[in-house]
């Protein structure tokens, strides 16, 4: 009992120490560094980065830098970059992937689909937040997964700062799964998935335009008991007029999609599925779309580029693990970029941690040196994990880049960040230096010195 009490006390103390006092932004001047700005350009030798008031003021050659201000840091020849922007992650919504109680990525028993908003599930104290931050990730998008419907729900943009204010923008995008996965969820056929998607978007169109569904209902006088008025569409009859398939919440959630206020992420891999997805813009011209997956994107790269639709993809998919990926190749990203497609590296979930992003980008640089293969330049590869996913997420020029006015998200590395052996030494978010310890680093220290004469470390409280 005493051991349990001690353990509980330690847990309470640890919880109390987390996010104890919000830190203030620091003015920092970092010199003697190789600076990568994240905008697609090549690194700058002997560069300087200046951060004031939580924002980047300067990043470039030392010769053009303003007068030093605030804390002066000599990087001693290390690398300085913007924080990584990891897109389509499970950061903050999973503690232990195999333990359902700690996993909010899916909602198999929910009556809702498109209406699911992942923002309330984000936990800034989740260990994968701290672990990703220690890997140089400063901002991310978090997305639910589709389980019982082609609609997974609405994802959020977060920052990984050591505080409780993680969600930057809730309901940043809607996620729909087509292709093989969507076909399975829709009843076994791609045709059914497209029918469901078109029906849903048309219902949302009508839901947004039909005045009868905005409050002219029998229960319109429902009160909530507080000072906040309810959306009139939530106070009416249990059923909506007409032949509909969506719940009121799901239909309302899709209204911003059809009006273009909210981006629609569409998961597809097969080349023909990609073209069919792009054709949706003919029927719904206000759709703002992002393709996710696109394993066969290189085969229709010209059409994707002409559409202006960006792509988020995993760069190491090169095996035909499914029939919709028969033409998968590691040259996929390079060929799409050469065709003019905007491509960001993403979909970090489960065992594919966001901290692996530099390794995957680095592989694309190495691929460029393989005869017959198509990879990326160093600048292109680094932009694919920083400024490009930030721009796709609506933060162009503000995140994933070292440029005047951008967030003060800065990482000092002990070497080239795209090299496997390099690691972050110091991380700032909004100009606030962040702690880099986490559950994994504490385990490392705990078991670094093993003495078999002592009790197992698990008993050492």
Image: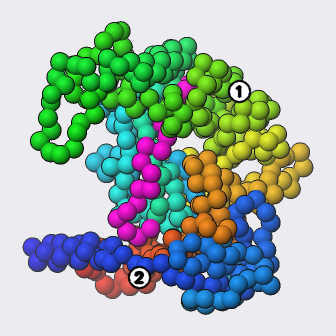
Q: Nearer the viewer, residue 295 or 47?
A: 47
The picture quadrant where one finds residue 363 is bottom right
* Element at label 2: loop
The CA span between labels 1 and 2 is 54 Å
Above or below, comparing residue 157 to residue 111 in the picture: below
Q: Residue 177's mark? A: none
The picture quadrant where one finds residue 286 is top right
| Image coloring type | rainbow
The spot of residue 426 in percent (x, y) is: 55, 78
Q: Nearer the viewer, residue 296 or 449?
A: 296
Residue name at image x 45 percent, y 77 percent: 435
Quadrant showing the N terminus: bottom left
Q: Which residues are magenta?
A: 161-181
Disc 2 target residue: 450
The spot of residue 90 in percent (x, y) is: 45, 50
Residue name at image x 48 percent, y 52 percent: 157
Residue name at image x 90 percent, y 49 percent: 371
Q: Residues within 10 Å of mark 2 (few under 14, many from 20)?
A: few
Whether label 1 touches label 2, CB < 8 Å: no
Disc 1 target residue: 271
Q: Nearer the viewer, residue 177 or 25?
A: 25
The picture quadrant where one finds residue 24 is bottom left
Residue name at image x 44 percent, y 56 percent: 168
Q: Residues within 10 Å of mark 1 (few under 14, many from 20)?
A: many
* Element at label 1: helix
Q: Is 269 placed left or right of 168 in the picture?
A: right
Does residue 162 show up magenta in the picture? yes
The spot of residue 288 in percent (x, y) is: 59, 34
How many numbered tags mark residues here?
Answer: 2
């Amino acid at each position: 009992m005493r051991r349990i009490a001690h353990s509980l006390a330690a847990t309470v103390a640890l919880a109390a120490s987390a996010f104890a006092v919000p830190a203030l932004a620091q003015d920092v001047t970092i010199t003697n560094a190789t600076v990568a700005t994240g905008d697609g350009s090549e690194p700058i030798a002997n560069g300087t980065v200046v951060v004031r008031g939580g924002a980047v003021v300067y990043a470039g050659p030392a010769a053009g830098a303003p007068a030093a201000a605030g804390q002066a840091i000599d990087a001693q020849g290390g690398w300085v970059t913007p924080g990584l922007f990891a897109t389509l992650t499970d950061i903050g919504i999973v503690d232990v992937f195999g333990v359902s109680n700690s996993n909010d990525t899916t909602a198999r028993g929910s009556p809702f689909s498109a209406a699911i908003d992942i923002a309330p599930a984000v936990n800034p104290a989740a260990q994968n937040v701290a672990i990703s931050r220690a890997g140089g990730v400063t901002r991310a998008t978090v997305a639910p997964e589709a389980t019982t419907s082609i609609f997974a729900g609405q994802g959020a943009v977060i920052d990984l700062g050591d505080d409780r204010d993680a969600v930057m923008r809730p309901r940043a995008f809607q996620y729909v799964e087509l292709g093989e996965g969507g076909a399975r969820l829709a009843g076994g056929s791609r045709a059914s998935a497209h029918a469901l998607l078109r029906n849903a978007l048309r219902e949302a169109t009508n839901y947004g335009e039909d005045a009868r569904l905005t409050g002219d209902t029998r229960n319109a006088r429902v009160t909530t008991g507080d000072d906040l008025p309810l959306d009139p569409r939530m106070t009416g009859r249990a059923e909506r007029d007409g032949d509909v398939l969506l719940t009121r919440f799901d239909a309302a959630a899709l209204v911003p999609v059809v009006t273009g206020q909210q981006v629609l992420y569409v998961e597809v891999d097969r080349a023909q599925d990609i073209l069919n997805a792009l054709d949706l813009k003919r029927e719904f011209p206000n759709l703002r779309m992002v393709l996710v997956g696109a394993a066969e994107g290189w085969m229709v790269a010209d059409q994707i580029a002409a559409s202006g639709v960006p792509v988020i993809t995993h760069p190491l998919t090169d095996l035909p693990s499914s029939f919709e990926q028969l033409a998968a190749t590691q040259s996929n990203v390079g060929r799409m970029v050469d065709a003019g497609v905007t491509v960001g590296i993403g979909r970090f979930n489960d065992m594919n941690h966001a901290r692996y992003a530099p390794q995957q980008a680095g592989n694309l640089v190495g691929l460029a040196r393989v005869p017959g293969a198509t990879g990326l330049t160093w600048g292109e590869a680094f932009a694919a994990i920083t400024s490009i996913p930030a721009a796709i997420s609506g933060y162009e020029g503000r995140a994933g880049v070292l440029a005047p006015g951008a967030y003060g998200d800065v990482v000092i590395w002990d070497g080239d960040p795209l090299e496997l052996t390099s690691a972050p030494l110091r991380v700032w978010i909004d100009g606030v230096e962040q702690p880099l310890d986490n559950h994994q680093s504490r385990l490392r220290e705990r078991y670094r010195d093993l003495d078999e004469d002592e009790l197992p470390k698990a008993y050492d409280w």
